[in-house]
């Protein structure tokens, strides 16, 4: 009987520890990474820490579409504090074209207790530009769009709608997604620069990949979408896993008595 109990507890522990291996790799990336020294092109991966944390970028190069590494100082005469070592990621889409950039949070999205963050900077609000957080099926579980002179959240479980339409040429959005359960998590947007604001809500599903986009603009410097400072933190707590394993083991023993 004791032998069976030990085997059961070992099996439970193996499942728990195995599940931790599927956690999103903790890591960071920004536009100053050496991988982007020759430009930001389709297939690059500049992860600074946590190699493989995001996989490669999937970009759609083409006529009237730009993906580049540049200083946010070109966005306005009063730019936000976005650059790392003088550069950020820059996207433009003009003459009816839409520039997109996809990236996965590897290997299988966030696990409970992890969060993903990214910073966006914008000036003009013509056309459309923003970010989707996508679930495991690649459908959007959150969208933040800048367009029609407004800043709007959609596709989330709660918190959808305008977060305020006050304009400033010095606008930075720090966006965070926190996976609180297998069913979903919390999102937040902290605005800084010429206007300060904080908004939050919830999303449904596993935060698994991002899509950044911009299109329908006139092509001026002020039309671009800038972003930077991707981060996935923290590593799931092994201590918490051990507590969970212990509790399951005790429950099993109790039922066997």
Image (cartoon, rainbow, N blue to C red):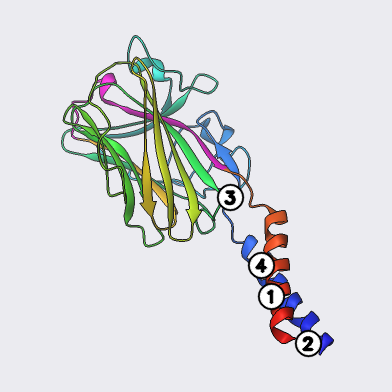
| Camera-nearest label, 3 or 2 | 2
Q: Which residue is mark 2?
A: 4
Residue at image location 58% in from the left, 43% down from the top: 233
| Camera-nearest label, 3 or 4 | 4
| Camera-nearest label, 1 or 4 | 1
| Camera-nearest label, 2 or 1 | 1
- Local crowd size for mark 2, using a 10 Å CA cut-off: few (<14), some (14–19), many (≥20): few
Please tell me in which quadrant of the rendered image residue 243 appears: bottom right
Quarter of the image with the N terminus is bottom right
For marks 3 and 1, the one nearer the N-term is 3
Residue at image location 80% in from the left, 80% down from the top: 6
Residue 16: which disc? Answer: 4
Q: Residue furthest right?
A: 2
Residue 98 in sight: yes
Residue at image location 71% in from the left, 77% down from the top: 11
Q: Are marks 3 and 1 in contact (CB under 8 Å)?
A: no
Residue 251: which disc? Answer: 1
Is residue 86 inside the magenta stretch? Answer: no
Q: Secondary structure at mark 4?
A: helix
In magenta, the rendered stretch is: 216-232
For marks 4 and 2, the one nearer the N-term is 2
Q: Is 206 situated left or right of 215 in this image?
A: right
Residue 134 in sight: no
Q: Which residue is mark 3?
A: 52
């Amino acid at each position: 009987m004791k032998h069976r109990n030990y085997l059961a507890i070992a099996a439970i522990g193996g499942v728990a520890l195995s599940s931790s291996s599927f956690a999103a790799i903790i890591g960071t990336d920004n536009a100053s990474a050496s991988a982007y020294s020759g430009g930001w092109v389709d297939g690059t991966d500049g992860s600074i820490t946590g190699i493989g944390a995001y996989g490669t970028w999937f970009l759609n190069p083409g006529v009237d579409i730009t993906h580049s590494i540049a200083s946010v100082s070109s966005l306005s005469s009063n730019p936000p504090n976005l650059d790392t070592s003088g550069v950020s990621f820059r996207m433009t889409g003009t003459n009816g074209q839409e520039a997109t950039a996809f990236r996965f949070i590897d290997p299988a999205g966030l696990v409970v207790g992890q969060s993903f963050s990214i910073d966006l900077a914008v000036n003009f609000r013509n056309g459309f530009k923003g970010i989707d957080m996508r679930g495991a099926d690649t459908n959007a579980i959150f969208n933040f769009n800048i367009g029609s002179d407004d800043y709007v959240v959609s596709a989330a479980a709660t918190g959808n709608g305008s977060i305020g339409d006050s304009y400033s040429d010095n606008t930075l959005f720090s966006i965070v997604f926190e996976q609180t359960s297998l069913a979903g998590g919390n999102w937040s947007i902290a605005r800084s620069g010429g206007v300060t604001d904080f908004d939050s809500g919830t999303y449904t599903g596993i935060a698994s990949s991002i899509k950044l986009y911009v299109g329908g603009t006139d092509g001026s410097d002020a039309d671009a979408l800038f972003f930077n400072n991707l981060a996935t933190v923290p590593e799931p707590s092994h201590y918490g896993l051990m507590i969970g394993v212990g509790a399951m083991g005790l429950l099993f023993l109790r039922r066997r008595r």
